[in-house]
Amino acid sequence: MPTTLKCISPIDGSIYAERPTLGLDQATAAVTRASRAQAAWADLPLAERISRVMIAREKIGEMNDQIVTELAWQMGRPVRYGGEFGGFSERTTYMAEIAEDALADVTIEDSARFRRFIRRVPHGLVLVIAPWNYPYMTAINTVAPALIAGNAVMLKHASQTPLVGERLAGAFDAAGIPEDVFQNVFLDHDTTSHLIAAKSFGFVNFTGSVGGGRAIERAAAGTFTGLGLELGGKDPGYVMDDADLDAAAETLMDGAMFNSGQCCCGIERVYVIEKHFDAFVEKCVAIVSKSKLGNPLDPETTLGPMANIRFAEEVRKQTAEAVAAGARPLIDAKLFPEDGGTYLMPQILVNVDHSMRVMRDESFGPVVGIMPVKSDEEAMRLMNDSEFGLTASLWTADADRAERIGNQIETGTVFMNRCDYLDPALCWTGCKNTGRGGGLSAIGYHNLTRPKSYHLKKA
């Protein structure tokens, strides 16, 4: 039975938007229309598909002023940061630029007797289930290459950001992409699971919680549907003896606090070589104490509310448990008056260890624990002491050392002297409970297509 999805604004608790979900019959009909439209879309020349996706990119750019305000109301990001069009454009553009090479036939033989080659062909219909924290950039990671590769796409966006899918649908429609080829749909969990179980899709890409990923896998069991899953994270930073402490403190605290800590690859725990621990922590406290918590519509605000009160409550619980177990909070609560709702002060914790949930479970909020370590070996052991593996940030002047340590870390991406960034030329991937598969780069195209072999005997 259809339900209503409601976006409760973190700014003031009001209902900012609500949309009815599709019933199962309506959703099944949408799948049928998409599947029928996909073949004609795939028959278009690759250059034409690329052109239309790039036009849609520009249409989103034209909406950016409106989008920035909508994002503040929907999920709380301060307007001072200008939205997501920079990253959205970078990722779309890069995937467009590499498409011809990434999707090119692999020729094995082209002689008088035989033509043998491998061609990459689209899966057909791709379901993208996108999160609210970076709703444009995370969606376009899959949507753009899926369309360019010749797939039809159905986008199910998070209920916290319902306007995002509508803006994308408007842009794609204005760019000449048939409305059945890209569909923004509002679905409840049961209908989504039913469609997956019914083998409605050739590929499903999901970004969200570990529990959500498990639900997707259960629904897909036995269907042989391809899955891409980016799930939880607990990304570490490691500050070594030869690190630039000022740069490390500035960048890692930005990685921990930006977007109110609601970043897939945000920094949630930091390990510092013992001799630099006190100096590093002092720098971090000074940086974070300058944050301005407030209404995201205020251009002076640097730290907006968390997207939902239940997210803020989880961070408060993790922090309180850690303090009760001996952790010491360093940020003065008097600097950040809050009402116990979505507006959550930032916090740095020391005297922490891995018995505490704040160093073990995903926090996804503006709190970070910092621990001293005696050696690279201890740092590597602690970085790997996690059920997650998305990114790790290493701070050193020695690239060989960073690579050597990176080889020992169970993670999807190794950063040196930076963090909380997605390079579209590199595969965005994770390990352990962070999920499976990979997006962007040429590998992203490989996951959104299947290989098809041709063995043509001429004589």
Image: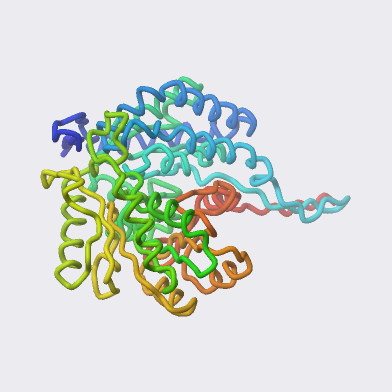
Image coords of residue 416 (percent x, y): 54, 59
Q: Nearer the viewer, residue 222 or 203?
A: 203
Residue 78 as seen in the image, left or right of residue 344: right
Chosen colour scheme: rainbow
Q: Is residue 132 left or right of residue 3?
A: right
Along the viewing direction, whichever of 433 and 183 lies nearer the viewer: 433
Taking the view exactly as shown, the residue that stands out farthest to the right is 112
Q: Nearer the viewer, residue 456 or 420?
A: 420
Observer able to see residue 9 = yes
Q: Residue at x 37, y 42 (%)?
A: 134
Residue found at x 27% / y 36%: 186
User: In terms of image quadrants, where is residue 223?
Assistant: bottom left
The mark total stands at: 0
Placement of 12 over or under 313, stated as above or below: above
Q: Is residue 12 left or right of residue 27?
A: left
Q: Quadrant of the N terminus?
A: top left
Residue 303, horizontal then vertical, whole percent: 29, 41
Q: Position of residue 358 (x, y in %)?
A: 26, 65
* Residue positioned 25% across, 39% down in the render: 160
Q: Quadrant of residue 321?
A: bottom left
**Residue found at the very far left of the displayed protein:** 339
Q: Is residue 221 visible?
A: no
Nearer to the camera, 409 or 122: 409
Q: In which quadrant of the rendered view does residue 130 lie?
A: top left
Residue 338 higher or lower than 319, as above or below: above
List x then y, in percent, for residue 209: 30, 56
